[in-house]
Image (spheres, rainbow, N blue to C red):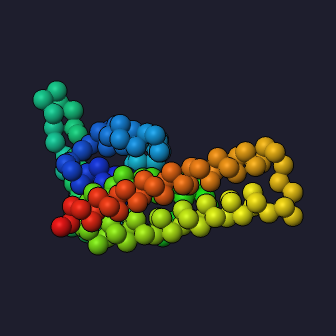
Amino acid sequence: MIELLILYIILKRDYTMYSIQKRITDIFAPFTNPSFGAIKPALKRLGGKECLTSRKIMSDGGKLSVYYEITKTGVNELKRLILEELSENPHQFLADARVKLSCADCLDKDERERLFFSIKSKALQFKNYAQNIMNDEYKQVGFYQKIILDNTVCEYTNFISVIEGLEKDNVRNSQ
């Protein structure tokens, strides 16, 4: 996920490593908060895949700054990462889906449609799974588990409503 975040941030403009970490925190902190130590190796990996280039600039104060810029390969990799299959782990799914939906503006209409369908399908699967556990009298789910499962069903219901709103907006903006 860190590579996706970096590529998305530098899609808009060139940044230093420090600025990349700050922009990720500014924009994505409610969903994820990668450490500065995770960014440097991710930048190296992306550079190795030719997804970004770097250039060194000497500041007025005599400090050397390295700026990172996305390449055409990087734009393709960003789209691939956004459209990549999501986790089967419900907790990881929600975190990753929120980040991917937040980055959907860099996709074209058909790519967004595919992303929304994929996320909505999996969210429905997890919602139905939680409902089935809650309603299965043979599972002997306790009071507290039912409360948490009910909350989970509500969370997925709300999340699915958000995706449906995004789907409508995608159709409206493509006409």
Q: Position of residue 131 (x, y in %)?
A: 68, 60
Figure quadrant of residue 87: bottom right
Q: Would residue 40 appear left or right of 149 to someone viewing this image?
A: left
Residue extending farthest left: 60
Between 162 and 41, the residue placed more toward the observer is 162
**Residue 93 visible, this orientation:** yes
The image quadrant where one finds the C terminus is bottom left
Figure quadrant of residue 132: bottom right
Say which residue appears at 32% left-offset and 40% top-offset: 23
**Residue 107 visible, this orientation:** no
Q: Position of residue 89 (x, y in %)?
A: 62, 61
Between 138 and 96, the residue placed more toward the observer is 138
Say which residue appears at 40% left-offset and 65% top-offset: 116
Above or below residue 70? Residue 148 is: above
Q: Would residue 35 appear left or right of 80 to someone viewing this image?
A: right
The image quadrant where one finds the N terminus is bottom left
Q: Position of residue 67 (x, y in %)?
A: 22, 46
Say which residue appears at 84% left-offset and 49% top-offset: 142
Above or below residue 48? Residue 34 is: above
Between 68 and 121, the residue placed more toward the observer is 121
Say which residue appears at 32% left-offset and 43% top-offset: 20
Q: Position of residue 19 (x, y in %)?
A: 29, 39
